[in-house]
Each structure stands twice: as C-alpha cells, then as structure tokens.
Image: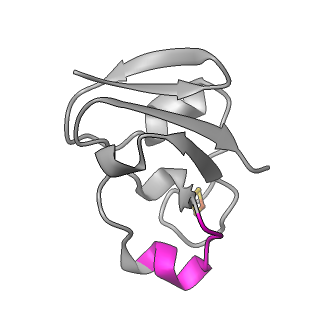
Amino acid sequence: MAKVEVDGKSLEVKDGEHIKDAIEELGVIIACADGTCGVCRVKIEEGMENLNEINEAEKGMECEEGERLGCQCKILKGEVKVKPVF
Ligand code: FES
C-alpha cells in the first residue's frame, strides 16, 4: 500500500492506482477527471519520484515545475504529499 497526504490528512492507495479519488476525499477539487480542465492541479511537496511519468494531458496543461494534475497521477509506491493549487 502507498499513502497520499493532502494538508496533513492522508489515505492509503494501492500501489499503481490513481490518486484521484483519495485526493478528492482529502479536499482537492476534481472536475473533468480527464486532464483537460486543470482545477485538480497540485504541488507535489514530497514523493514526485513515487508517481508515474507526466503524461500527454499534463504536458498539454503546462504545469509549473513541481506541479501535476492530480487526476492524472498514479502512485507507484511509498508516500506522496500534495498541496492543492486552487
Ligand atoms: S480534474 Fe480536470 S484536469 Fe484534472
């Protein structure tokens, strides 16, 4: 099991699973869930190396350094700490 943390609250997520549902439960806004609206943008405070590679949808959104689209992230292992941008 991996763990995702948002503003000090955390949930467990299976290795290799999307973090979308967990971060939504922890307060991150998820809208389109397909990488086109950008409201799920999060700053990765710790554990970027534990996430999947940035995908085409995220490249198209031109996230700032250290940011990802929460709806597009899968956690591979370990722990990831994120902070909502919006
Ligand atoms: S919820 Fe729209 S880009 Fe992630």
For the question of whether residue 74 can be seen, the reply is no
Task: State ligand 1's quadrant.
Answer: bottom right
Up-down relation of residue 76 to residue 59 (above or below): above
Q: Which residues are magenta?
A: 57-65
Percent position of residue 32, x then y: 58, 60
Q: Give the quadrant of residue 4.
A: top left
Up-down relation of residue 17 to residue 67 (above or below): above
In the rendered structure, the answer to whether residue 8 lies left or right of residue 20 reads: right
Percent position of residue 86, x then y: 79, 49
Residue lying furthest bottom: 60
For the question of whether residue 53 can be seen, the reply is yes
Q: Residue at x 60, y 67 (%)?
A: 65
- Decide which of 70, 44 is in the foreground and name it: 44
Task: Report the quarter where the N terminus lies.
Answer: top left
In the rendered structure, the answer to whether residue 35 lies left or right of residue 40 reads: left
Residue 62 in the magenta stretch? The answer is yes
Q: Residue at x 26, y 40 (%)?
A: 17
Percent position of residue 83, x then y: 66, 39
Q: How many numbered circles does the render carry?
A: 0
Percent position of residue 60, x then y: 53, 84
